[in-house]
Structure formats: structure tokens, C-alpha cells
Amino acid sequence: MERGGGLHDQRNAPRGRVHAPGRRILQPNILADDAEDVYEIIKKDEGKKKPNPGDTSGSGTEGKGDAGEKGGGNDDRPNDPGRSGEVRDVPNETGGEGSEADRREAESDWKVAVSQAASMAAAMGDGMSEAIERAVKEILRPSIDWASALHRFVHEQTAKTETWVPPDRRFIWQGVYVPGLGGREAGHIVVGFDTSGSIGGAIVEKFAAEIAAVRDEVGAEVTVVYADNAVRRVEHFDKGEEIVLHPAGGGGTDFGPVFEYVDRENIQPACLIYLTDLEGRFPKDAPPFPVLWAVIGGGDVAPFGEVLRIK
């Protein structure tokens, strides 16, 4: 072979030397016979880049001034001097600071990735160590106070924010226009109940009590939709009314009918909370309102919404 870097060149190279491939990038300043010499050259070059302790001119890769205050030069990793990687907030689509929704979407994506990796490892017969297995379970099933998380979720969705549409009516008669309080109406919370047969027991009574409590806190009415692979029963509970659940059904699980019922009845809920084991067929598209999957046993990952484990 005639081309530089071919097998013939390598076998006939002098002892202790190996030719670089034909297409290569060379730095003439670090050409040397031995690897040890190359390292020494690199060390010297790195030493030249370090500024003197008394130098305040801002020159050098880590000097002071505008560049130095950000970590030096054009480096976009100011908090990572060791170049070992750092943890940053989730960005949005334009690269700016991400919102809470962006964070939840990224968290859901990573949970899906972790779940898939664990499933692939199990399918290939490559068992995980106990430490890794515990870490995976903690990611997919974190230990939290589910009742507090449920209240937090509902309050977040019904929080009021300032808005100019409409303005505050109390001041319009004076010819003064100031922003009013707007946001999602707290008037309606929809609860989906998976009646496929795996949900029941004292935990359901506790769940119903918490739904009633948070309903009264935000001043909403609750509609409970019982479904397996179709809607089997619907119950409405006004503010202050005791919520007693009466499941009906028992077939396979399809989450779609509950969302279809909400759309068909033109309900615009502040949020939808689905009590389920998370094992069933999901709708193709996410709904235009927040969803919380209140999960008892079963799966860990949903294609949209938040997942909260009920224990």
C-alpha cells in the first residue's frame, strides 16, 4: 500500500515509531519521539497560559475582567473548572431558563429512559447490582408524602395570577384599569377511577378523603368518572359533600374513555387526577389540562402528566 497510514507503513515503521493515518491533524509544536516528551510539552504550554498572581490585566484564559469573571475566555462552563461535567437547570426550546412544565417533561423523559434501560438489561440477562437496582427504584418510585403532593398539585393548577384580560372590575367605574386575578378556574376537578379490578381497599377511602379536603380548600366541585375500557359510571360531588366512591366495571384498562368523556361533555377542568395502577392503553395525545396519575402498585411511567405513587 502506498498511501500513508496504511498497514504496510505501520509494519515497516522503525521500532518505537508508528505513522499517523493519512488524514490527520498535526500540531507541529508537540511533535516528539516519545509520548512522555509530548506530555512534557503540553505541561509547559499549559503553564504559559496561567496568569501571574499579580496580573490584573484580564489576559490569559483565567484572568480577571469580564472574561475571567465567567470562568475565562469563551468557556461556557463557569462552574466546572475540572471539566468533569456539571448539573444545570432544564432549558427551554430557545435555550433560556426552563419553566416548571419543561422540568416535568424532562423528568418524565428521563424516567422513561431509565425504565427502558432497566428493562433492556433484564431482557439481556445482565443483572444489575443491588446498589444500582435500589437507585433505579428510587428514581421511578421516590418515597414522598403523597397526600401533601396531591394538595400541592391541585393548588398549583388553581393558583391565581395577575392578568389584563379581564382587568379588575372593581376599578373600571373610576376609569382606572388595573390587572385582575386570573388563571385556571378552580370550579371543576375531574377524577378518573380505574375499575379494571386492581384498585381497592382502605387506600381508596384515604384517597377519597384527600380529594374532598383539597376540593374544599380550593372551592371546587368534583366529577368522578369510573372506567375500565369504557366509562361505566359518573358521579358528581359539590363542595362540602362527602365523597364516597362507588366503582363500577372490571374489564381491561383503556385510559382514553375518561378523556373523551371530558371532551364530549365540554368540561374544562382545572386538572384531572387519575387513580390507577398505570397499566393500560394511553391516549395518543396529551389533553390541554394538567394530569396527575395517582398510582397504586403497577407501572411507573406515563407519556404525559405527573406520576404520584399512592402508598
Image (cartoon, rainbow, N blue to C red):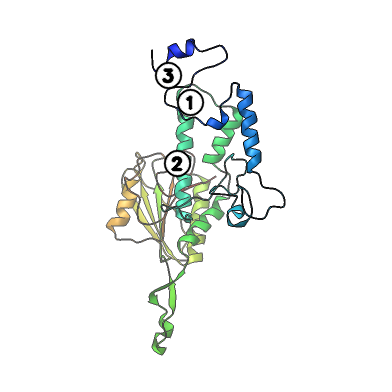
Q: Which mark is residue 151?
A: none
Q: Is residue 58 above or below residue 279?
A: below
Residue at image mark 3: 4
Q: Residue at x 55, y 50 (%)?
A: 146
Q: CA distance from mark 2 to mark 3?
A: 53 Å
- Mark nearest the camera among 3 and 1 is 3
- For badge 1, the amino acid type reads Ala
Residue at image mark 2: 301
Q: Is residue 20 above or below residue 296?
A: above
* Residue at far left of view: 264
Residue at image mark 1: 122
Mark 1 and 2 residues: CB-CB less than 8 Å, in contact? no
Direction from residue 157 to residue 225 in the image, left or right: left
Direction from residue 131 to residue 265 in the image, left or right: left
Between discs 1 and 2, the one toward the N terminus: 1
SS state under label 1: helix
Pick the front one: 49 or 261: 49
Q: Answer with the quarter of the image where residue 48 lies.
A: top right
Q: Residue 66, position in %: x, y?
A: 58, 57
Q: Residue at x 49, y 60 (%)?
A: 156
Q: Residue 294, position in %: x, y?
A: 47, 48
Q: Answer with the quarter of the image where residue 56 lies.
A: bottom right
* Residue at far front of view: 28
SS state under label 2: loop
